[in-house]
RNA sequence: GGGUGAUUAGCUCAGUGGAUUAGAGCACAGGCCUCCGGAGCCUGGGGUCGGGGGUUCGAAUCCCCCAUCGCCCGCCA
């Protein structure tokens, strides 16, 4: 519908022979649905754009465009206004609105979907935590935002793969093994000294208990290397299992679990990836040996310093693995790569991009979404989330306390580059203060209406949609038809919170309408069925929107 | 010192070139169904959009400077 308006504008601009922009590039005309109804049903800034390109008066240009549109006589345009500095406002008749409602009903779960992505293969890599402990609440925002971005991109026609990069190589894993081994030794009455910056959670001793009770428990003291490895591997697989479970409880499910150890370092072809990466960088002259280590010269490719990729002890750094991993992503045929990272990794963005640039890979295909921290608050007081002391709040604790829907809603409510206060006491409140229920409640109310109407023999019918000419009805319809652009904009900027805001607005408008207007007792069966139809459309959009956020839309609450 | 994100109502935040009065939720004050779900609705007070310059027909939005807060700056991952 908006596209039709846009086409009309472009046609008339063309017919006038006006340049779209000064440099002849693609026009940036916008057609928007204004919030104030005196500004019409649709509005465009076309005249302002053209005027600034040609140096002429915006209102005069607008006048010419308006005349051109009027001459080509489009049946559904009732009135055209020129307002303010030169906006052209369109007032359309209800035929256009009712056709949009029919479209919503016809498309159902597909309303708002698009093929903008054109099947492009996109990989979203997110969470990617070390499997050395339970997921803490800080991971939750990353998980939920990444997942919602995936849902939104799929809805927009992208072929999305969700990948979890398991950082299961390197010192962290060794340390995990040592700690569990130490805890196991402890159960045999042997005490060991360990570095202080390790893992202190109670899960370490729980894992040791599990090992001790298993039939394959190694003897301690006995063959130390085997016992250590057993502890490490047992802890690894158990913790990975627990992470998968927590994520799944959060409705986050991955397509790929990509093991750094196996795929990058492993003997089954993996180590060639590391060697191959080094070789390519060497061939390109992008590395240098210095102070006994091998450095990637990132400063030559846009970063502000160089980074070590092979340490003096000959071991690769995490950064080298990361380069190899991202080369591998490209080689798997993805044309769009999205990494969802914690804001504390922001300095890695430019170094990774510079490495892709050095390798001649299209770095513009790689976007990194940095997620700012979450502060957990209860009754206005910050809940400490210190990992060092082992006191951190786990994802599963929060899930158990407030449930998946509220957790997701709150984590998605804010722009990712804004710090987020997650208020535990508010999130679990089942009252009007809690915005999750506000949206879900609108949906439940509509379900209830549909149930009651069936009993009364009223069916939501498309036949009488033309009766919906009230102001409140029009404003609901106008919000409904903004849904596709809300989705589109959320997809382009990887911003699920735009969908959240949209849904709150739609739910608000519906609650207002519901309080003011009788739907089932509206005087005539025709009117009742038309209003019911409108309510059903609202429900379709709420269901679709909540679906994009991975939040349920219960029929009753 | 460098980098990065933020700074908008009492609080938590949207808005990031547009339309005489800058929005929402919470909090606060007052009100609303003999009737479809009161987890709802309405009304009201409350802001020099951190400060200062600049660009523009037009700036909360773009540019520069400054201030404050978070995060990062390891041959850890």
Image (spheres, coloured by chain):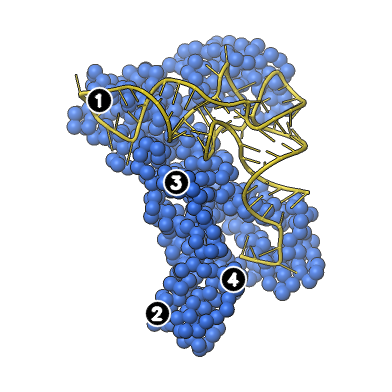
Chain colours: A blue, B yellow
**Whether labels 4 and 2 share one chain:** yes
Q: Which residue is mark 3?
A: A379
Chain for mark 3?
A
Question: Which numbered mark, 4 or 2, is in the foreground of this view?
Answer: 4
**Whether labels 3 and 1 share one chain:** yes
Secondary structure category for the residue under label 3: loop
Characterize the local packing of mark 3: few (<14), some (14-19) or many (20 or more) Cα atoms within 10 angstroms.
few
Let me know if residue A360 appears in the view. no
In screen coordinates, is A197 left or right of A531? right
Let me know if residue A271 appears in the view. yes
Disc 4 + disc 3, Cβ < 8 Å: no
Q: Which residue is mark 2?
A: A214
Question: What number is the disc on residue A520?
Answer: 1
Secondary structure category for the residue under label 2: loop
Secondary structure category for the residue under label 4: loop
Characterize the local packing of mark 1: few (<14), some (14-19) or many (20 or more) Cα atoms within 10 angstroms.
many
- Residue A386 occupies which quadrant of the picture? bottom right
Characterize the local packing of mark 4: few (<14), some (14-19) or many (20 or more) Cα atoms within 10 angstroms.
few
**Whether labels 3 and 2 share one chain:** yes
- What whole-number distance in Å separates the C-alpha atoms at marks 4 and 1? 68 Å
First-in-chain label (4 vs 3): 4
First-in-chain label (4 vs 2): 4
- What whole-number distance in Å separates the C-alpha atoms at marks 4 and 2? 28 Å
């Amino acid at each position: 519908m908006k596209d039709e308006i846009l086409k009309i504008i472009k046609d008339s601009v063309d017919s006038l022979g006006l340049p779209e922009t000064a440099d002849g590039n693609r026009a940036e005309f916008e057609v928007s649905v204004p919030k104030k109804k005196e500004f019409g049903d649709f509005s465009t800034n076309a005249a302002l754009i053209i005027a600034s390109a040609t140096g002429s008066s915006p209102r005069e240009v607008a006048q010419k465009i308006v005349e051109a549109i009027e001459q080509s006589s489009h049946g559904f345009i009732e009135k055209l206004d020129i307002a303010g500095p030169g906006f052209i406002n369109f007032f359309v008749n209800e035929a256009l609105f009712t056709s949009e409602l029919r479209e919503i009903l016809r498309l159902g779960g597909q309303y708002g979907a698009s093929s903008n992505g054109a099947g492009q293969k996109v990989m979203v890599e997110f969470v990617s935590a070390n499997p050395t402990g339970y997921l803490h609440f800080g991971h939750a925002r990353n998980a939920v935002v990444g997942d919602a971005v995936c849902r939104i991109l799929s809805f927009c026609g992208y072929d999305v793969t969700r990948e979890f990069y398991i950082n299961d190589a390197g010192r962290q894993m060794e340390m995990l093994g040592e700690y569990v081994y130490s805890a196991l030794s402890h159960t045999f009455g042997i005490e060991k000294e360990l570095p202080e910056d390790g893992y202190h959670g109670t899960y370490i001793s729980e894992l040791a208990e599990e090992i001790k009770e298993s039939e394959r428990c190694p003897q301690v003291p006995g063959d130390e290397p085997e016992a250590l490895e057993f502890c490490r591997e047992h802890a690894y697989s158990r913790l990975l299992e627990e992470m998968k479970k927590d994520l799944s409880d959060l409705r986050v499910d991955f397509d790929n679990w990509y093991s750094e150890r196996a795929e990058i370092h492993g003997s089954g072809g993996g180590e060639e990836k590391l060697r191959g990466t080094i070789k390519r960088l060497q061939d390109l002259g992008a590395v240098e040996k210095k102070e006994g280590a091998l450095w990637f010269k990132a400063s030559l490719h846009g970063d502000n310093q160089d980074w070590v990729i092979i340490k003096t002890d000959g071991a690769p750094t995490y950064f080298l693995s990361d380069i190899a991993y991202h080369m591998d992503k490209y080689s798997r045929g993805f044309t769009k790569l999205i990494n969802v990272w914690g804001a504390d990794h922001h300095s890695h963005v430019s170094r990774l991009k510079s490495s892709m640039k050095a390798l001649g890979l299209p770095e513009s295909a790689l976007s990194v979404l940095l997620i700012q921290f979450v502060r957990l608050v209860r009754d206005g007081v910050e809940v400490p989330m210190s990992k060092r002391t082992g006191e951190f709040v786990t994802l599963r604790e929060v899930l158990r306390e407030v449930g998946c829907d509220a957790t997701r809603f709150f984590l998605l409510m804010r722009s990712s580059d804004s710090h987020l206060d997650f208020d535990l006491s508010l999130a679990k409140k089942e009252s009007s203060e809690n915005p999750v229920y506000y949206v879900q409640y609108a949906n439940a109310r509509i379900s209830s209406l549909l149930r009651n109407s069936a009993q009364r023999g009223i069916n939501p019918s498309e036949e009488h949609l033309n009766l919906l000419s009230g102001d409140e009805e029009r404003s609901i319809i106008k919000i409904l038809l903004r849904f596709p652009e809300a989705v589109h904009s959320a997809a382009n900027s990887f911003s699920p919170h735009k969908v959240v805001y949209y849904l709150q607005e739609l739910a608000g408008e519906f609650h207002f309408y519901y309080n003011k207007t009788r739907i089932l007792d509206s005087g005539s069966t025709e009117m009742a069925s038309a209003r019911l139809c409108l309510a059903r459309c609202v429900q379709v959009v709420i269901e679709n929107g909540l679906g994009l956020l991975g939040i349920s839309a219960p029929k009753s609450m």
